[in-house]
Amino acid sequence: MTERRVIFIGKKPLHAYVRAVVKAMEDGDRELQLVARGATISRAVDVAEVCRRRNGHIAQSLPETVNIQNLSCESQEVEGENGMRTVSVLRIDIEGVGALPVIQEE
């Protein structure tokens, strides 16, 4: 099995990450992993759901079907201002199945 392309979810707007998923799939990477830590976990879930449902103008460029294959939750020790702390990490594996839509230029 080949390595999945990883998209790290941060504090940018939701559409920026949906666009990153679209771009990766247009480049031929149909299996991706969204990774989020701490407060950005909810944004990663939103990105996965927008892609799965193909909601919005940007997500319409995704393949016919986007499946959520696997979810994993873990914790990591990170060094902060006050020493080591534990941060939750969510990994969401998604897969695009089917043809990409043909976009007609005007």
Image (cartoon, rainbow, N blue to C red):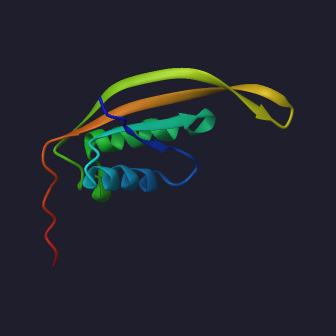
Residue shown at 31% from the left, 53% from the top: 22
Residue shown at 56% from the left, 28% from the top: 89
Residue shown at 26% from the left, 46% from the top: 54
Q: Is residue 13 left or right of residue 80?
A: left
Residue positioned most to the front: 2
Measuring from the top left, give residue 88's x and y in whole percent: 61, 26
Residue 34 found in image quarter: top left
Residue positioned most to the bottom: 106
Which corner quadrant holds the C terminus?
A: bottom left
Q: Is residue 46 above or below residue 17?
A: above
How many numbered marks are there? Answer: 0
Measuring from the top left, give residue 97's x and y in whole percent: 18, 39
Q: In this view, does 19 lie above or below 78?
A: below
Measuring from the top left, give residue 81's x and y in whole percent: 84, 37
Measuring from the top left, give residue 86's x and y in whole percent: 70, 24
Which corner quadrant holds the N terminus?
A: top left
Q: In this view, does 74 lie to the left or right of 55?
A: right
Q: Which of 12 and 53 is in front in this view?
A: 12
Residue 94 found in image quarter: top left
Q: Which of 56 and 96 is in front in this view?
A: 96
Q: In this view, does 83 lie to the left or right of 64?
A: right
